[in-house]
Image (cartoon, rainbow, N blue to C red):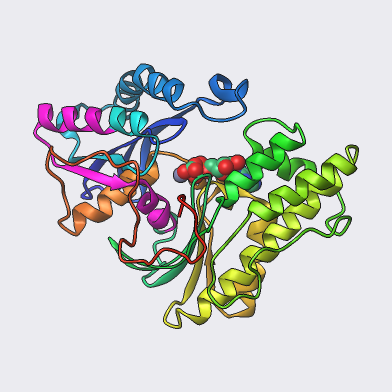
Amino acid sequence: MTDAPLILGIESSCDETAAALLRGRTIVAQRIASQDDAHRIYGGVVPEIAARAHVEALAPMIEAVLAEAGVGLAEVDAIAATAGPGLIGGVMVGLVTGKALALAADKPLVAVNHLEGHALSPRLVDPDLEFPYLLLLVSGGHCQLLEVQGVGRYRRLATTIDDAVGEAFDKVAKIMGLGFPGGPAVERCAKDGNPKAFKLPRPLSGTDEPHFSFAGLKTAVLRTFQANPHAAADIAASFQAAVIDCLTDRTLKALAAAPDVTALVVAGGVASNAAIRAALTGLADARALKFVAPPGWLCTDNAAMIAWAGAERLAAGLTDGLDAPARPRWPLDPEAAPARGAGVKA
Ligand code: KG4
Ligand code: ZN
């Protein structure tokens, strides 16, 4: 793989600053700086603080990655930077940095959709994963089922009509005072609980279209916790069980609408949840589908997935000009109709 192009990836769309150098499927060097400590006291990501932290962290991080790999910018073949969707201040920091490096070193720029980074990341770790596959994309900002038909080619089968699933985990953690970031805290707490202790709703389960909804579940957790303030572990376990039922029910519906897929893939921050992975593994086995879940660190935000998406786009001849816009919203399937009943977030 030494002939494969060397790609510098840059990620700054939320609260992780990350840079990576990738050659083929080999991660030559990478760094990820989480801003958890800066946001913890607010219980959520503060966009202005995030953008400032990216400004401080990014340039020295790129220098460190290049130094670790023992290469200069001249030896990099292309720069791949996240251009959205995400918190616009942070996206601009990474994209403008990528543009400046591309201009200074006269290298091609690939303006990467962060969601495409997640969507293609399973192919970074599994060379045998071929298109089309069904992707369950579950992160802090998104909850979607997509048929991944090829690089840049997505058919959205479902989205959330209110909260993203990671957002629901984060809010449940906040309700029960479990800490930040919420997903891993809820998962840890749920380990000691009984998933059948509380009967929580499974919103939209059983409906024809495979869309998601988590607002009602979150409200049910709030009421249950108010009535049972010492039952955090049982509530966390019951919440996680309800989420798993929603995800598997909706995934089965989407599979029926995508008969050509041969693999089920889960990606995005929530995909690092072991109980969710186990449930999806069982579902894929029962359907004789290949199942791919990237390792936990590749599920949460990182720059290796951006470099990989950049490499896939570069190989397909898809590069961008220095006028590539930073996009706070950027759907993978612009043709998809809004989900019925969806609020502004859809
Ligand atoms: O993909 P990601 O790192 O950032 C976005 O693009 O949103 O996803 C972050 C989300 C957060 O909501 C976080 O609470 C959730 O993923 N998350 C988890 C777990 N680890 C991270 N949710 C459930 N269980 C986990 N172990
Ligand atoms: Zn993400």
x, y percentage for residue 231? Answer: 89, 42
Q: What residue is drawn where x is 38% and y is 46%?
A: 305
Instruction: Residue at 30%, 27% (x, y): give it.
Output: 93
> Quick check: 174 above or below 4?
above
Q: Is residue 29 magenta?
A: no
Of residues 44 and 150, the one drawn nearer to the viewer in this rendering: 44
Q: Quadrant of residue 155?
A: bottom left
- Vertically, is 125 above or below 322? below
Q: Tell me the quadrant of the picture where the C terminus can be found.
A: bottom left
Range of magenta residues: 95-122
Judging depth in this view, the residue of 164 and 96 nearest the camera is 164
Q: Is residue 90 above or below residue 128?
A: above
Foreground residue among 334 and 338: 338
Q: Position of residue 76 (x, y in %)?
A: 20, 36
Q: Main secondary structure of the magenta part?
A: helix
Which residue shows up at 46% across the image and 31% down it? Answer: 16
Q: How far across and how far down the image is residue 24, in percent?
A: 30, 50
In terms of depth relative to the viewer, which is nearer, 87 or 161? 161
Which x, y percent locates residue 306?
A: 34, 44
